[in-house]
Image (cartoon, rainbow, N blue to C red):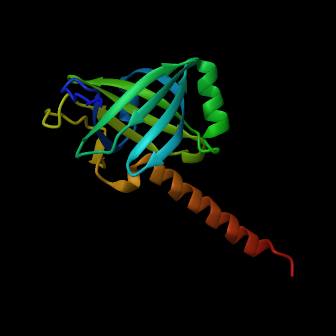
Amino acid sequence: MYQLQVTPTMPKEIERKFLLANDSWREAVSRSIRLRDGILAFYDGRKIRIRFYNEKATLTVKGPRRGLVRDEFEYEIPASDGLILLEQHCKGDVLEKTRHHIIFGEREWVVDEYHGLLEGVILAEVELPSEEACLVLPDWVAKEVTQLEKYRKVNLVKARKRKVADAVRRAGKVHQPK
């Protein structure tokens, strides 16, 4: 029987998420990249994501969150496979965003500006070396939402779809012929 040896060097994601106070972050952007993300599977806080950017694709497996920490395994896959997975296996829930990179102090921040289904949603994230790491917040950061479930992408998508479905139902009731 094989026994897994868990070591401290196994890949971990330690990330904090924030709402923005204003648009002044745009002045500090060092580079931007357009991304397409799709969730292949989601179960009990675990997810498998496919990402396509710059003619490259990655497959990422994320474990359940424990505080700010979760296991994260990311693998580059052939771009053609990534496109097939996005277009044929993500049930139309492909998110598009521009990821803006910003260096502030000792940290690299990313600001994700969503398009399409989540148009208008803009969130900042920063990865940390440990949960206890000191973090100085830029003045363009408003409120931390790391632990708030409603700001997880899966919940943002569900909320937006409900809003659209409600609007369609209301429009149908208004415009139905007698």
Q: Quadrant of residue 61?
A: top left
Q: Residue furthest bottom?
A: 178
Q: Is residue 96 above or below residue 100?
A: below
Would you say 1 lies left or right of 60 here? left
Would you say 71 lies left or right of 81 here? left
Q: Position of residue 108 (x, y in %)?
A: 30, 24
Tell me the residue at 22%/36% (across/down). 137
Q: Residue furthest right?
A: 178
Q: Position of residue 99 (x, y in %)?
A: 45, 29
Q: Nearer the viewer, residue 139 or 165?
A: 165
Tell me the residue at 87%/82% (across/down). 178
Q: Nearer the viewer, residue 112 or 139?
A: 112
Q: Position of residue 18 (x, y in %)?
A: 32, 43
Tell me the residue at 43%/27% (across/down). 100
Q: Quadrant of residue 85?
A: top right
Tell me the residue at 41%/26% (across/down). 74
